[in-house]
Amino acid sequence: MRQILLLVVVLSSLATASDTIKPLFETSSVREYDRWLWQHRSEYTRFRPVRVRVGEECSGSGWTRLAAAFLTDSGTEFVRHVYPDSWQGIRIQQVSNINVTEAGDYSIVYRRVGGGTAYDRYGRKLFDGAVYPRFNLWFRDISGKDTIAHRHPWSEGVSESDSTQLLNDEGEVVGALPRVSAWTATASGDTLVAAVSRSGVLVFDRRARIRWRDSLFGAASRIAAISQDGRTVAVVTRDSVGLHDLVTGENKVLGFDAAMASSVRARSIALSADGGLVAVLYRVGESAPDSLLLRVLTRDAKKVAPPRSLVSDYIDNMFWMGDTVVLVASPGVTENKGGKMYQIGSCAALAVTLNGDTRTLTVPGRFGRLGVWYQQGRCLAYVDTQMSDYAVFRVPMD
């Protein structure tokens, strides 16, 4: 059964303080969660309901097989796909895995190694293939000579031994790129995508046409992001932060002190909605308690404030909310569940303003390190497919 946990955080004034956020809504049912989100759909337009989950189908004799169940936006199950190849002819419960990945309006249900079936939000089968959805696009990584780059004039220069293809809803290839890291990419609405490739950062459209190729750092690029307004691209390496303006073509580069650059590694980046502010998180060493370094700069590559040291827990989830940087830390509580180790427990949100004020918010509950976070204005949504809890939280207003 697909499991999910939603966290909604509304931030108020951010003076130095520590608060505990109490649950506003909790449930162990995915249907109740979907129903709640449906009732509040005008408030949380960017938080999507659970649309597909893994369940079980029982035979008349009591044996089970795995199935994929698709849900309406309000939580009602309306399509159920049972996979005949998962039945076992002997008296053991089948253990074949069915994994589900959701992104935007699409889902991929993996029922065998190296492949799966692509579905839309209504549970309609689109095609079979080894693909993954992101930004309402279908991506497929190709190795060897099994690429179609030569068929697409805008893909000139794509290596025939290593590429990423973009597919349409019929499973047809619409374009090819040099191999990109789509899982770490960011997008500006439904227009452009910025992703790191082996030859540097690429900005491309929905037909895999390259609109900008990084000439600042080339293959040295570590992470990259594009602003929501589609204007600013940030490129980060170990020793530099580069900003490219897609409208004017202007480049700005801010370098590290040479002594510090040798000891840091870029881990994550967040751009404000208009691209005017950039936050970059670096890891400094591995064992020091304060092993993270937060740098904030403007679109013209000017430092906003001195770098701040943070504890290593705040390493994966970082967002801009107005002129405040919000970081979320996963818990470190270990539980053995079904023979697997999970990180569960309360989480902490750290809000850092440009003037240096910091507020720490503790959220009780069950949070894990495999969860995914989403943002809508001053709200955050946390989704974890490993857990069985559903909850909503709000920060008390001061």
Image (spheres, helix red, strand yellow):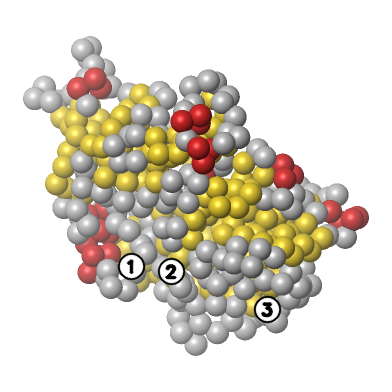
Residue 39 location, quadrant: bottom left
Label 1 belongs to which residue? 45
Three-letter amino acid code at the position of disc 3: Leu
At x 91%, y 55%, the residue is 259
From the top left corner, tell me how far across and down residue 56 is, in percent. 22, 34
Q: Secondary structure at mark 3?
A: loop
Instruction: Single out the residue that lies furthest toward the top.
Output: 90
Determine whether, in the image, residue 258 is placed left or right of residue 302: right
From the top left corner, tell me how far across and down residue 18 is, in percent. 59, 76
Distance (Cα) linking label 1 and label 2:
8 Å
Q: Relative to 122, is 297 above or below?
A: below
Nearer-the-camera pick, 80 or 234? 234
- The reply to whether the C-beta atoms of the residues labelled 1 and 2 are less than 8 Å apart is yes
Three-letter amino acid code at the position of disc 2: Gln
Determine whether, in the image, residue 30 is placed left or right of residue 19: left
Q: Relative to 298, is 251 above or below?
A: above
Q: Which mark is residue 376?
A: 2
The mark tally for this picture is: 3
Q: Relative to 328, is 43 above or below?
A: below
Label 3 belongs to which residue? 354
Which callout, 2 or 3, points at the residue further toward the start of the chain? 3
Q: Secondary structure at mark 1?
A: loop
- The reply to whether the C-beta atoms of the residues labelled 2 and 3 are less than 8 Å apart is no
From the top left corner, tell me how far across and down residue 240 is, in percent. 78, 57
Q: Which mark is residue 111?
A: none
